Image: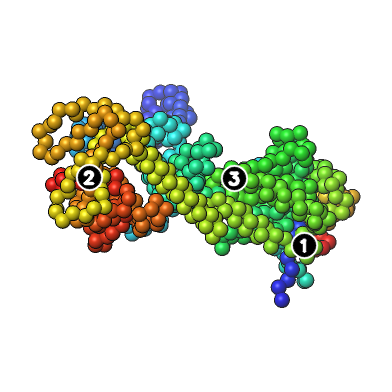
């Protein structure tokens, strides 16, 4: 701005002041104007920025709105999904029973395929897990496990018992078969005398005693001195067994005994095998046995160990592992084993020749005695009526042959052997067409029947037929009661008879009293 | 010609968990098992060692260590002609027991051969016994010392071989 143009024209001092003021404030005014312009510019800029910010805010707001909208929609979707999930859960829960069979089928197929294709891998993978699972299950639910496996165990045990019973039965059958004979008879008798039944004896023999292995072991070190086995194949660990047996004996002595050598383990039972230990001073003998130990067994072991120490004590004591320093022990063990086996078998061994002969002789003598007793008894019974009975009509065959086929009854009284006559009640004649002898009270006359050769009769008792009419003559055969015979001849009280034997017609002599003649013969 | 076979009983001695059973297993079966199962009483194994003129059938009695030994272990030492006495290089207290076990065996047999093994040599970082200490003890007990590792097999064969060679036949 030009200051000269703004000063009043009619004032001499005022224009100057104004001019001065103009001059003085011109610069300020210019600065003010510049500031005003700047302020205006700034205001303008601010306005523009404000507008831009507003626009930006609007944009952001729009975006926020959009995002909120999206979030709402997502929430809705999530809610829908949640609802769907809930629905699925409820569906699965509802259909689980239906799903199980389907899944089971699928899984079974998969597992079956895997087992078929990778059997070893499956076993490898499942083995430890199953073992642990079973252990845990047994620990936690013992009763349940027992119930679950009871049928299996029962079946297994039943099978095992059945197997054992069958084997035992076979053994007993075999033993019973051998019992039917003199040997079996004497065994039974022996068992009875000892207070044991035959069945118990059979069971005892069905579980035979056997020595499986013998170990001779040095006391102190447990080193194996000798070993003998019946088995063809041994496990090769006999020296380890020797060591372990010694360790077990030491443990038992230290734990349960007083630590002295006098107390030691004598026996170990393992399954159906028993280890019988016989101690000596420097070595002990361990015998692995099965079955029931006979009473002589330990005595044999004791004798063996004792004799071994008598003969070889220094060698047994000083043994340091070198077998060359030992006597030849294996044959001794083998011999002992053989002796033990023989001794066991002797009880059930068949009899030797001498025993058989003695038994046969004894049997014959017994039979002879029985036969003689029978004969004597029969003879006594037969003579009893003659000796003590009432007088009866006795048919006596006479040596007079007749031509007729019928025997002729004669009334010839002959004295009987009855010492005293007895009264009979046959005083009244009977209606019997056959003439009945009528004995009187005197002299006991007995009607006799005189058999005629060719007469038929039957034996009235079992009787020996002899070669000659003599009691001392050789007996041919015994014939039974009611055997029809034909009387060929008579000599004294003997009749020569002929009868149909198994090998055709036979002849011989029998006392006539053992014949009953047929009625048509006139007897 | 078949070489004669001579049996000899040797023992494995040492405190519990020093690795006696592992050493025996490594020597006899050439295998190692990380699991620790404490030996109850005794475990016997056998290993034939071929010598020039004979085969030495070593019957190795692996005896339970620690408290179990004092119960029945001494009985098991009878008849032993040598022992491998073991300590654990990672546990200094096992070194102190070497003298006890050596004394137990020497009481029964003055001539028994002793070999000492510092086992678990593979665990170098955990080692707590230095070689000078253990060598001093072994010298005092008149036995050779070898560091071993049942896990890696380091010097296991050598320890038993040395024991076998020292046994008089």
How far apart, in angstroms, are the residues tagged by discs 1 and 2? 96 Å
Q: Residue at x 43, y 26 (%)?
A: A18
Q: Residue at x 50, y 51 (%)?
A: A362
Q: Chain under label 2?
A: A
Q: Where residue A247 appears, x then y in whole percent?
A: 70, 45
Q: Nearer the viewer, mark 1 or mark 3?
A: 3
Relative to the observer, which residue lies in front, A264 or A180? A180
Image quadrant in which the C terminus of chain A is located: top left
Q: Where residue B19 appears, x then y in whole percent?
A: 69, 49
The residue that mark 1 highlights is A327
Image quadrant in which the N terminus of chain A is located: top left
Give yes or no for contact between labels 3 and 2 (Cβ–Cβ under 8 Å): no
Relative to the observer, which residue lies in front, A82 or A171? A171
Q: Chain under label 1?
A: A
Residue A337 is labelled as none
In this picture, residue B77 sits left or right of residue B19: right
Label whose residue precedes the other's in the sequence (1 or 3)? 3
Residue A449 is labelled as 2
The residue that mark 3 highlights is A294
Q: Residue at x 68, y 41 (%)?
A: A265
Label 3's element? Answer: loop
Relative to the observer, which residue lies in front, A256 or A454? A454
Q: Where residue B79 appears, x then y in whole percent?
A: 79, 51
In this picture, residue A517 sits left or right of residue A49: left
Label 1's element? Answer: loop
Q: Chain under label 3?
A: A
Q: Where residue B72 appears, x then y in whole percent?
A: 74, 39
């Amino acid at each position: 701005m030009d200051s000269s143009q703004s000063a009043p024209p009619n004032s001499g001092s005022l224009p100057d002041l104004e001019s001065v003021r103009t001059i003085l404030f011109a610069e300020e005014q210019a600065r003010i104007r510049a500031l005003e312009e700047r302020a205006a510019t700034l205001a303008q800029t601010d306005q523009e920025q404000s507008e831009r910010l507003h626009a930006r805010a609007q944009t952001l707001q729009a975006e926020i709105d959009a995002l909120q909208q999206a979030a709402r929609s997502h929430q809705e979707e999530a809610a829908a999904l949640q609802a769907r999930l809930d629905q699925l859960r409820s569906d699965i829960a509802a259909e689980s029973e239906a799903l199980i069979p389907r899944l089971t089928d699928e899984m079974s197929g998969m597992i079956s395929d895997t087992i078929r294709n990778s059997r070893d891998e499956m076993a490898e993978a499942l083995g430890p897990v199953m073992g642990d699972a079973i252990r845990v299950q047994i620990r936690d639910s013992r009763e349940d496990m027992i119930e679950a496996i009871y049928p299996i165990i029962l079946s297994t045990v039943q099978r095992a018992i059945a197997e054992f019973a069958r084997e035992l039965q076979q053994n007993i059958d075999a033993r019973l078969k051998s019992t039917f004979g003199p040997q079996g008879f004497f065994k039974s008798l022996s068992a009875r005398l000892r207070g044991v039944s035959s069945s118990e004896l059979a069971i005892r023999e069905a579980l035979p005693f056997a020595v499986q292995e013998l170990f001779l072991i040095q006391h102190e070190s447990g080193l194996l001195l000798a070993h003998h086995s019946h088995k063809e194949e041994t496990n090769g660990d006999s020296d380890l067994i020797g060591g372990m047996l010694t360790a077990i004996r030491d443990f038992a002595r230290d734990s349960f005994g007083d630590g002295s050598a006098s107390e030691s383990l004598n026996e170990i039972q393992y399954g159906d095998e028993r280890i019988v230990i016989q101690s000596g001073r420097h070595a002990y003998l361990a015998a692995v046995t099965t079955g029931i130990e006979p009473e002589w067994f330990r005595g044999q072991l004791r004798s063996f160990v004792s004799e071994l120490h008598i003969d070889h004590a220094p060698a047994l004591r000083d043994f340091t592992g070198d077998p060359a320093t030992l006597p030849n022990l294996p044959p001794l063990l083998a011999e002992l084993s053989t002796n033990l086996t023989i001794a066991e078998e002797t009880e059930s061994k068949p009899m030797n020749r001498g025993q058989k002969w003695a038994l046969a002789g004894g049997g014959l003598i017994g039979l002879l005695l029985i036969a003689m007793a029978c004969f004597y008894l029969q003879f006594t019974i037969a003579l009893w009526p003659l000796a003590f009975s009432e007088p009866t009509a006795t048919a006596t065959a006479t040596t007079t042959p007749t031509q007729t086929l019928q025997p002729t009854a004669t009334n010839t009284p002959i004295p009987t052997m009855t010492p005293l006559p007895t009264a009979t009640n046959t005083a009244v004649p009977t209606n019997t067409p056959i003439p009945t002898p009528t004995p009187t009270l005197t002299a006991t006359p007995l009607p006799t029947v005189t058999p005629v050769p060719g007469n038929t009769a039957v034996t009235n008792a079992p009787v020996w037929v002899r070669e000659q009419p003599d009691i001392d003559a050789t007996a041919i055969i015994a014939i039974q009661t009611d055997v029809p015979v034909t009387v060929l001849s008579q000599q004294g009280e003997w009749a020569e008879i002929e009868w149909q034997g198994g090998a055709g017609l036979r002849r011989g002599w029998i006392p006539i009293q053992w014949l009953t003649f047929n009625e048509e013969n006139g007897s | 010609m078949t070489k004669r076979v001579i049996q000899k009983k040797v023992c494995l001695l040492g405190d519990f968990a020093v690795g006696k059973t592992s050493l025996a297993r490594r020597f006899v079966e050439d295998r190692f098992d990380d699991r620790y199962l404490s030996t109850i009483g005794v475990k016997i194994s056998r290993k034939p060692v071929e010598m020039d003129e004979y085969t030495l059938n070593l019957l190795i009695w692996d005896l339970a260590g620690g408290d179990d030994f004092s119960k029945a272990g001494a009985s098991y030492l009878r008849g032993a002609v040598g022992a491998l006495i073991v300590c654990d290089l990672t546990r200094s207290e096992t070194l102190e027991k070497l003298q006890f076990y050596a004394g137990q065996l020497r009481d029964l047999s003055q001539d028994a051969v002793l070999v000492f093994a510092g086992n678990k040599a593979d665990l170098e970082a955990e080692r707590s016994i230095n070689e000078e200490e253990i060598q001093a003890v072994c010298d005092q007990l008149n036995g050779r010392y070898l560091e071993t590792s049942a896990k890696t097999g380091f010097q296991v064969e050598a320890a038993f071989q040395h024991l076998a060679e020292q046994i008089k036949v």
